[in-house]
Image (spheres, rainbow, N blue to C red):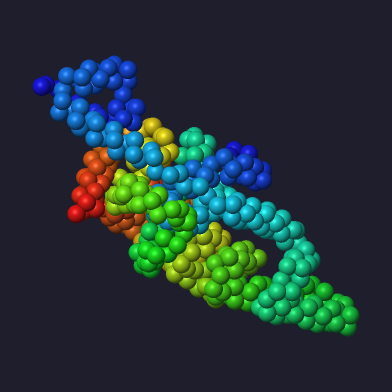
Amino acid sequence: MKNHVTERLPDYLTNELDRMQKAEVDSHLEECALCREEYDALLKLWTKLGTLPEEVPSQEARVRFYAMLDAYQEGAKHQRSVSGGLVAALNELVGKFWPREPVMQLAVALVLLIVGLIGGIRFTSPGQEQTELASLRNEVQMMGRLLTVSLLNQQSASERLRGVSWTNQIDQPDPQILTALMNALRYDSNVDVRLAAVDALVKFVGDPNVQSEMVDALPAQDSPLVQIALIDLMVEEGIKQSTKVMQKMSADPKINAAVKIRIEEGMKELSL
Amino acid sequence: MILVRDGDVAKLGLLFERHHGKLFNFLVRITDRRDVGEDLVQDVFFRILKYRHTFRGDAPFTAWMYQLGRNAAADHFRKWKEDPVPHEAMESNKSPEPTASDMLEHMEKNSLLHLALSRLPIEKREVLVLSRFQGMKYEEISTILNCPVGTVKARVHFALKELRDIYLNLSEEAVL
């Protein structure tokens, strides 16, 4: 029997053949017992696969999703009002953190103490307003650092995520914060925390030390999402020293296909 | 999804209602664990929310969602490799067994096939799941897997044949 159709049977079953190809297979199956036997076996398997019970998610999945969505929207609202100004930031802090965690209570207490001190100094030395305001800003920044480092050491991934997002409050690169962020990027077990660390490090990427740390961290990542986020950053910032690392990663046969494509695109952009 | 990307985050609820069942099915078949499937669905929708600005709209939303699902499953496998969970954990998350005769029949038919499916290498299992259970065409699968249609076609071919061999071997072992 010529032109056996066994190679086309999976496409026949998955309905990927056009009308003409299908007719050819049909007519061959009528004549060829060998191919028909193969077809019957595959059809049996294909049909049986269809009888495997469908997996239905529990109601809890819906509850968890809407809780996550609400929390996200709430968080976004907070983010907007926090970025509204210093006073709003303090309001958010008191409202959100005071009742629950000791770390937060300490931070709020610190803020109140600082505000009290500055207020007292202002009444006694009205001529030094600018200095006091700068001092207040410094103190708030210091508190942000304290919070960030504390949160990044929490067991819960969502707390660590909050820690990373707190770094947005910090304008000046601080060695302690940078080390904490780099540690989060390199060693945190949660992909979302690592991705947030990449986002947070963007504002400090002008620092050559940060650049080289990030280049070093790239091959150590095991998540394709984090790898792509880092590669995007390298390309956007034109960090040419990353090309050597990317070349090496690209040569690795185990590399994720999407990462490989991004590396190839990235290398082109970096060579321009 | 375009509305979600452009800031109407509440609309993600519609996408969740429409697609989470299918995504859950895919993830359970891939990981062979209901509890992990549920966690990964949450993970995928969180990533959709967080990275919504990266959705380009040149491919369907579902393709992007399944890509995120595959990445989440890959992360799970990587972690699981480091910290394997006993098989009993998976058993405890299955639906309650009905009668003894139902169980026997299930054991004889579905479980063997289920077991055979779980023994397929992941890259073959996922094309088969996408094709048979998600009802996708090779073209759609190739978009999700970011590979040529020919690769999908070849994987489906090998997957079906390998599944049949595994299933036959298991059936013979069960008879002995």
Q: Is residue A96 above or below residue A225?
A: below
In which quadrant will I find the N terminus of chain B? top right
The foreground one among A262 and A206 is A262
The foreground one among A194 and A234 is A194
* Numbered label tally: 0
Measuring 84% from the left and 78% from the top, which residue is drawn there?
Answer: A119
In which quadrant will I find the C terminus of chain B? bottom left
Measuring 43% from the left and 44% from the top, which residue is drawn there?
Answer: A53
Q: Is residue B14 above or below residue A228?
A: above
Residue positioned most to the left:
A1
The foreground one among B62 and A160 is B62
Measuring 27% from the left and 17% from the top, which residue is drawn there?
Answer: A23
| A95 horizontally vs B36: left or right | right
Residue B157: give x, y in percent of width and height: 26, 37
Q: Is residue A140 above or below residue A168?
A: below
The foreground one among A80 and B24 is B24
Measuring 78% from the left and 81% from the top, which residue is drawn there?
Answer: A113
Residue B120: give x, y in percent of width and height: 29, 49
Residue A183: give x, y in percent of width and height: 47, 71
| A190 horizontally vs A165: left or right | left
Residue A203 appearing in the image:
yes
Residue B114 appearing in the image:
no
Residue B116: give x, y in percent of width and height: 29, 49
| B83 horizontally vs B153: left or right | right
Q: Is residue A104 above or below residue B6?
A: below
On the image, which quarter does residue B5 sit in?
A: top right
